[in-house]
Amino acid sequence: MYKVLIIITIFTSFCFAQEKIDNSFITKFEYGQMLYENPRGIGCHKCHGKDAKGSFIALYKDKKGTIQKVTAPNITNLTKEKFYKKLQSKKNKSKIMPTYFLTQDELDSIFFYIKNLDTNL
């Protein structure tokens, strides 16, 4: 009887100890990177670049025939509030930035990834 009680105690304490361990499959940075490259549609890196510092997108002629250049802005210096506002708005003023339907956790992860790019490259 004493041995059974010891085995049950050890097993129970092992089970409760496992709950405290972070068994995440990927880190928050890796999850953010995955979302940055494919957030349900065109990846952020396609316009903002791998380093999130912006890049050239296209040239076009306006109604007057003048050639205009379209570039994506640097997003590494955005505040969290501005970043969230831009990604959560239904229609963007720029008419270029796609609308994404991301969860709060996904937004947090992408923002974390962008803010930590320099330390992980």
Image: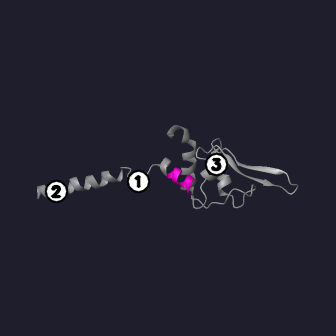
Residue displayed at 20% across by 57% down: 8
Residue at (74%, 58%) from the top-left corner? 95
Name the amino acid type tagged 2: Leu
Please state the extent of the stretch shown in magenta in the rendering.
31-38
What residue would you read off at disc 2? 5
Most distant residue in the right direction: 64
Q: Which residue is mark 3?
A: 48
* Secondary element at image label 1: loop
The image shows residue 44 at horizontal and vertical percentages of 61, 53
Q: Around disc 2, counting alpha carbons within 10 Å, would you say few (fewer than 14), some (14 to 19), or many (20 or more)?
A: few
Which badge, 2 or 1, comes first in the chain's sequence?
A: 2
**Percent of width and height locating residue 121:** 51, 40
Give whichever of discs 1 and 3 has the lower sequence position: 1
The answer to which of 118 and 83 lies nearer the viewer is 118
Residue, disc 1: 25
Apparent side of residue 86 relative to residue 26 in the rendered image (left or right):
right
Q: Quadrant of residue 42?
A: bottom right
The residue nearer to you, when weighing 104 against 20, is: 104
Distance between the alpha carbons at the discs numbered 2 and 3 = 60 Å
* Mark toward the start of the polypeptide (2 vs 3): 2
Q: Inspect the image, locate mark 3, and give the three-letter code of the amino acid beneath it.
A: His
Q: Specify whether residue 50 is painted magenta.
A: no
Tell me the element at label 2. Answer: helix
State how far apart marks 2 and 1 are (Cα): 34 Å
Q: Nearer the viewer, residue 119 or 79?
A: 119
Indicate yes or no whether the magenta region holds residue 37: yes
User: What's the residue at 56%, 53% (across, down)?
Assistant: 37
Given the image, on which type of amino acid does mark 1 rest? Phe
The picture places residue 34, in percent across and down from the top left corner, at: 51, 53
Disc 1 from disc 3: Cα separation: 27 Å
